Image (cartoon, helix red, strand yellow):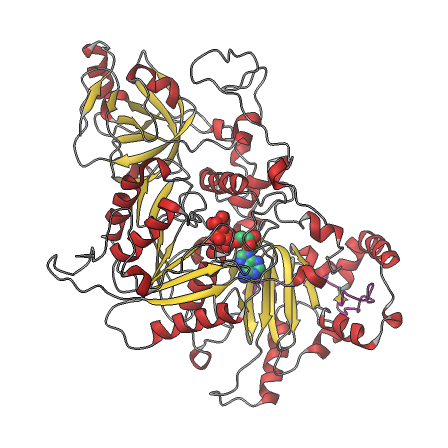
């Protein structure tokens, strides 16, 4: 690796700085913290601990037969009986769509608000008696029988077999009886609680009830019914409503829904722009898709109805693909399935991946996920290529499940046009860490024309792909089908037919080309292939959400006030102990620190030791090396030769970081424009700026205006 010496700061100064930090170059100067920021309330802490526990590796597969009885929380038994009325009354069905039962206590707290809302909804809707039979039936299906345990602020929901709850919002779901399915993942009684996130940026989640399977059990239906009722009773300190109990039968599912409050949700909702990030989208509001149900609302869930309540749309080819991929894993094979999912932009690749991954997790402990999409990443911030081992289901969009990858390379841009070779070499370096013991899902970019298509051809060959899932929409094909026959003659960017080797085990002289199984999937959901235009659906917004989610890891896991990014004490790192480089363009070495200030940098680990001789150490080429996370370079002290960095990466990992890579991935604007608690001018933001300066550019504020090319004709 070539390195440039930039400025000649006195060696004496440099030695001092290095000596000072000789034990660990990542050093924090601790100031006393504002005690108000550390205040916590214990209520939601419990919830978070449970979510934290969830992140430990656990084998989910509890087969019904072996399922342990549900652990009933001890706090129920000691719930303050005096606080809850001994008899619960059935709250009248305030709206034809919302079967709601509230106990007395909840009614006393919220009833006025709820009934006001109910009346307003009723005025717009039809009374149940006026509905024709078929509509009545449909409305019945939309009745959600839930009861609120007001003391613990949690809801028990009884669902009939095959009933579906399509919803917006977020909650923690525990299955108490029977089993339910969410985005391909089966949740049974006896399993841990799972967090569900259904924001308006993506199609809504659905909870589908599958009831109880008595197949292999010695229990009969009557015993099942008694067991279900006993479980429900244990979740309430007083007798649950008769209405709720009358809804239970042996085939019902009983789930517990609790409010979900995490550092991520608190951090996001601290920005006014994101206040409704778990609310309804404009289309759902316009079509009055929300079902009024105060019990579900109390735990953060809004049930949907009508055309907006379709959830995931699975075409026959979609179902077939999922089922043959599951069979591929279940059946005999000489190597683990390596599944590459591709297709044009917004055709449903990521959603298919999540569904597939969840379905696989019903049968295996882990799935490996190779991220090849730089823009719409699943687990890591944008601009990163990564390999993750996934052991927990994905029950929300990417920004709700940022995770630490097994290996990661910082590419530094949301697209790879500028340096396709570095992109492919980075992926090859990640591929070497695939274990070969779990199925692998490869997420690809929506760039399927020209060089983008050649990259797909390369990936299929280089990564020994066993299954290609190609998604398309409409009648006109978006690109050539990547069938085995086509691959025999196709040219990639790096590979050409006949290919002589794969990265795995084939000797270079071996000329056999491994064939793959090709699965074509037709996406039939509304808007397939069209970028989302509603709030929070645009790709730049989703990237910002992923970055905000990443930096929300800085927040305390304990409930309490949100701390803006500029409140965190930065690490001080000597210029001489970390090299700095720019991934995506030429910057004169003397200007690099200006460019890097107030920017996101990849925290990387070069295999060579970095030893500066005064002044910053500047890389002349972009290395392909392990990246352990991102940081914000929030200041540079030239006099003392220090970088100031804020990052959620743990100090033990930071010890290995000796390289900062500056890319094109920029801080979400909201982090710069909303710096709470700052008097006067906002740091890093100015309106008094000369655009004559080379490289200057103003902050582009997106006003939600549709570009002329995107305006659709209504004719
Ligand atoms: N099967 C489906 N049914 C209903 N909605 C879907 C389905 N698949 C995807 N969507 C919705 O379409 C939008 C785009 O989906 P997704 O992000 O999965 O596409 P993508 O091909 O990965 O996009 P990109 O090219 O930006 O990576 C999302 O709002 C998603 O919720």
Q: Nearer the viewer, residue 532 or 472?
A: 472
**In this picture, residue 503 sits left or right of residue 177:** left
- The chief SS type of the magenta part is loop
**In this picture, residue 552 sits left or right of residue 85:** left
Please name the residue shown 58% across and 78% down the image: 211
* Quarter location, residue 646: top left
Q: Is residue 52 above or below residue 136?
A: above
Q: Nearer the viewer, residue 318 or 55?
A: 318
Q: Could you tell me which quadrant the N terminus lies in?
A: top left
* Quarter location, residue 600: top left
Q: Is residue 237 above or below residue 221?
A: above
- Could you say where residue 708 lies in the image, as x and y percent from the top left? 63, 36
- Residue 90 lies in the magenta-colored region: yes
- Could you say where residue 355 lies in the image, as x and y percent from the top left? 47, 63
Q: Nearer the viewer, residue 619 or 584?
A: 584
**In this picture, residue 585 sits left or right of residue 71:** left
Please name the residue shown 73% across and 57% down the image: 290
- Residue 576 lies in the magenta-colored region: no
- Could you say where residue 210 lies in the image, as x and y percent from the top left? 57, 76
Q: Is residue 238 above or below residue 502?
A: below
Please indicate, yes or no, whether residue 241 appears anywhere in the rendered image: yes
Q: Nearer the viewer, residue 140 or 57?
A: 140
The magenta segment is 74-99
Q: Is residue 74 above or below residue 425?
A: below
Could you tell me how many numbered marks the image carries? Answer: 0
- Could you say where residue 115 lies in the image, as x and y percent from the top left? 84, 56
Please indicate, yes or no, whether residue 46 appears anywhere in the rendered image: no
């Amino acid at each position: 690796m070539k390195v440039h010496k930039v400025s000649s700061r006195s060696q004496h100064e440099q030695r001092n700085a290095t000596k000072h930090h000789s034990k660990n170059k990542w050093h924090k100067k601790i100031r006393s913290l504002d005690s108000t920021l550390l205040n916590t309330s214990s209520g939601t802490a419990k919830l978070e601990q449970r979510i934290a526990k969830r992140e430990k590796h656990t084998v989910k597969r509890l087969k019904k037969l072996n399922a342990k009885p549900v652990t009933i929380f001890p706090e129920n038994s000691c719930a303050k009986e005096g606080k809850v009325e001994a008899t619960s009354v059935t709250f009248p069905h305030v709206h034809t769509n919302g079967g709601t039962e509230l106990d007395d206590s909840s009614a006393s707290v919220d009833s006025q608000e709820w009934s006001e809302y109910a009346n307003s909804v009723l005025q717009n809707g039809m009374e149940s008696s006026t509905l024709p039979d078929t509509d009545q039936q449909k409305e019945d299906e939309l009745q959600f029988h839930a009861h609120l345990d007001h003391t613990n602020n949690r809801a028990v929901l009884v669902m009939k077999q095959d009933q579906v709850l399509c919803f917006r919002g977020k909650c923690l779901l525990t299955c108490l009886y029977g089993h339910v399915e969410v985005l391909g993942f089966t949740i049974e009684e006896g399993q841990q609680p799972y967090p569900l996130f259904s924001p308006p940026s993506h199609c809504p989640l659905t909870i589908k009830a599958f009831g109880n399977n008595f197949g292999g059990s010695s229990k009969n239906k009557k015993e099942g019914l008694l067991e279900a009722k006993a479980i429900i009773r244990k979740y309430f300190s007083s007798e649950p409503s008769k209405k709720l109990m009358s809804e239970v039968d042996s085939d019902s599912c009983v789930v517990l829904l609790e409010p979900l409050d995490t550092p991520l949700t608190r951090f996001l909702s601290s920005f006014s722009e994101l206040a409704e990030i778990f609310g309804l989208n404009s289309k759902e509001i316009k079509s009055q898709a929300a079902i009024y149900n105060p019990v579900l609302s109390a735990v953060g869930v809004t049930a949907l109805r009508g055309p907006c309540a379709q959830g995931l749309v699975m075409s026959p080819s979609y179902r077939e693909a999922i089922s043959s991929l599951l069979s591929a894993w279940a059946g005999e094979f000489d190597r683990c399935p390596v599944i590459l999912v591709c297709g044009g932009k917004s055709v449903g690749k990521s959603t298919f991946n999540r569904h597939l991954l969840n379905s696989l997790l019903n049968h295996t402990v882990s799935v490996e996920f190779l991220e090849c999409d730089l823009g719409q990443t699943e687990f890591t911030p944008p601009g990163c290529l990564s390999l993750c081992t996934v052991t927990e289901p994905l029950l929300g969009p990417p920004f709700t499940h940022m995770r630490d990858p097994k290996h990661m390379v910082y590419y530094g841009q949301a697209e790879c046009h500028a340096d396709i070779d570095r992109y492919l070499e980075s992926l090859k370096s990640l591929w070497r860490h695939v274990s070969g013991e779990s199925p692998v899902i490869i997420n690809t970019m929506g760039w399927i024309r020209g060089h983008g298509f050649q990259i797909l051809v390369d990936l299929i060959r280089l990564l020994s792909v066993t299954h290609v899932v190609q998604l398309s929409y409409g009648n006109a094909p978006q690109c050539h089908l990547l069938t085995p026959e086509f691959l025999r003659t196709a040219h990639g960017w790096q590979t050409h037919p006949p290919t002589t080797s794969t990265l795995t085990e084939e000797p270079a002289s071996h000329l056999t080309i491994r064939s793959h199984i090709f699965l074509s999937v037709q996406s039939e959901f509304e808007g397939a292939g069209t970028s989302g235009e509603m709030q929070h659906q645009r790709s730049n917004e989703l990237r910002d959400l992923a970055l905000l989610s990443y930096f929300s890891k800085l927040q305390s896991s304990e409930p309490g006030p949100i701390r803006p990014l500029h409140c965190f004490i930065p690490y001080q790192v000597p210029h001489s102990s970390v090299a700095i480089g720019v991934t995506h363009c030429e910057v004169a070495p003397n200007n690099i620190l200006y460019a890097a200030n107030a920017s996101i940098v990849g925290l990387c680990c070069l295999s060579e030791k970095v030893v500066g001789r005064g002044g910053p150490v500047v890389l002349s080429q972009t290395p392909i090396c392990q990246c352990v996370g991102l940081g914000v370079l929030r200041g540079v002290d030239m006099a003392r030769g220090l970088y100031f960095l804020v990052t959620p990466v743990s100090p033990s990992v930071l010890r290995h970081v000796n390289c900062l890579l500056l890319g094109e991935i920029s801080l979400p604007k909201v982090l710069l424009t909303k710096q709470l608690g700052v008097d006067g001018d906002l740091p890093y933001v100015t309106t008094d700026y000369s655009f004559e300066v080379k490289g200057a550019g103003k902050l582009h504020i997106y006003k939600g205006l549709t570009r002329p090319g995107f305006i659709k004709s209504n004719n």
